[in-house]
Amino acid sequence: MKTEDNIENKDIFLAKWIAGEISDSELKKLVSEEDFNVFQEIKNQSEHLSVPNFDTDKNFSAIKQKLETPKKKSKVIPLWMYAAAASVVIMISFFLFKTSSTVIQTSFGEQRIVMLADSSEVILNAKSKLTYQPELWKFERKLKLEGEGYFKVKKGSTFTVETENGSVTVLGTQFDVNTSDDFFKVVCYEGKVSVKQQNKEVILTQSDAYQNIQNEITTWNSKNEAPTWINGEISFEKTPLKIVFESLEKQFDISIENKTSSNKLFTGTLSNTNLELALQTLTSAMQLKYTISGKNITITE
Amino acid sequence: MTEDKKSVCKPTVFEELYKKHSKDVFNFMFYKTGSKANAEDLLQEAFVKLWKNCEKVAYEKAKSFLFTVSSNLFLNEKKHEKVVHKYIENQNKSSYKDNDTPENVLRQKEFQDKLNNAIASLSEKQREVFLMSRIDKKKYAEIAETLGISVKAVEKRMHNALVILRDKIGKI
């Protein structure tokens, strides 16, 4: 190394050396042997430094979650913070379309509370999906639901829950909507809701329940003050076994194979937290048998 | 990438940017905070900001936006108070050779501890340059671009970092 270079590089030569831009022998001319040995050791050892593992997917989900719940007013609060302040429940199911709006989805057995911009709330049951457009919320209170949600609506303009099977419109009330393929159920816990299905409109008032299974409409009086699922139970009213099984599948992340031809209707309440208990209750009421093998349940006569 | 206008507002583009830069931003924040949890928080915040400003940030500028924003977030949140620097998650035994004597392994272990402490005592600016170079294996030019400073400035920080490390490590 030439002397001029030394002067030019005097405050960066170590950086040059560790990057391989100047050689060991050149460095030895610039530092003592002892220093050189330490530098050499720093170079070797720092080669093996590492940072903790970074979970790309997990962090991306976290980001998406932060984006789903606009900071202003909407936020997701854990369910336990919520006592059972009862209101209305509507049940609706399956596919609604996707827009580029906010989407909140729950997984098997998961429940979430969603606060909307006007402080209306939705409690989403397991395996359900809620889609809405926060920017338009001021102008139009409208959201789409797949699965089941319990709505507590602040008084104000019309509030509409759209589903594949029909829509529910309310003016400040509490109701539960549950929907899946050909199943549509709405229970009004407070206030008044209007249910529209295929151009027919039904008005529900407090404790009215409405259910449509394959175009067979049932209405009854609900004794509950809030949907039972928010308190760890699921209740059914004259519901085909197929729908009961679907509901258990969503809650417990299992798969149920029904080997019976039974299409009896079930009325009763099942545990939302204990699968065995739920199966026992259900099968003894319906005089059926069940076997569990891992995540697969088989139902027989 | 042929379209000259790739909108960051497109979810696919956003995800692509995430895949491309998240690890680097995470490491960068980790060098500053010395904590995985804090680094993840800051990383997430930075990407949330990117999304919220997607209309204003050009695709090509996204990387520098992320580094600038995460840096600022770090400074604002003062997460660096009381940071315990534990970069050297050196489960990485690769620095030992199979035929090493126990004395030698012990000596290396001691050196690693010293190095670890010495790195923790670097200034934040020296530390991030040193670690971006040694861990991320980035060229000085790349670091300079990321931090928005000159290559010469990067080299100076690196040089000073080495001087300080040597000083802190003392005799071996």
Image (cartoon, coloured by chain):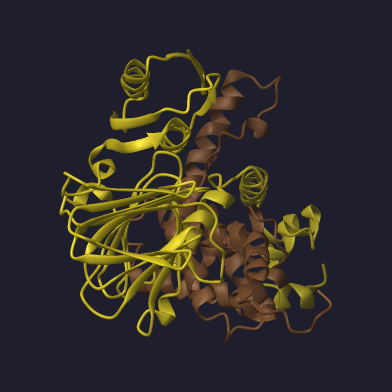
Chain colours: A yellow, B brown
Instruction: State the residue at coordinates (50%, 34%).
Output: B110
From the viewer's perspective, tell me whether residue A295 is left or right of residue A88.
Answer: right
The picture places residue B148, in percent across and down from the top left corner, at: 61, 80
Q: Nearer the viewer, residue A192 or B156?
A: A192
The picture places residue A157, in percent across and down from the top left corner, at: 28, 81
Q: Nearer the viewer, residue B128 or B115?
A: B128
**In which quarter of the view is residue B83 placed?**
bottom left
Q: Is residue B92 above or below residue A171?
A: above
**Residue A176 visible in this rendered orientation of the protein:** yes
Instruction: State the residue at coordinates (44%, 48%).
Output: B117
Q: Nearer the viewer, residue A86 or A4?
A: A86
From the viewer's perspective, tell me whether residue A172 is left or right of residue B55.
Answer: left
> How many callouts does the rendering have?
0
Q: Nearer the viewer, residue B62 or A277?
A: A277
The picture places residue A241, in percent across and down from the top left corner, at: 44, 30
**Residue B163 visible in this rendered orientation of the protein:** no
Instruction: State the residue at coordinates (68%, 62%).
Output: B20
**In which quarter of the view is residue A205 placed?**
bottom left
The picture places residue A54, in percent across and down from the top left corner, at: 55, 48
Quarter of the image that includes the N terminus of chain A:
bottom right
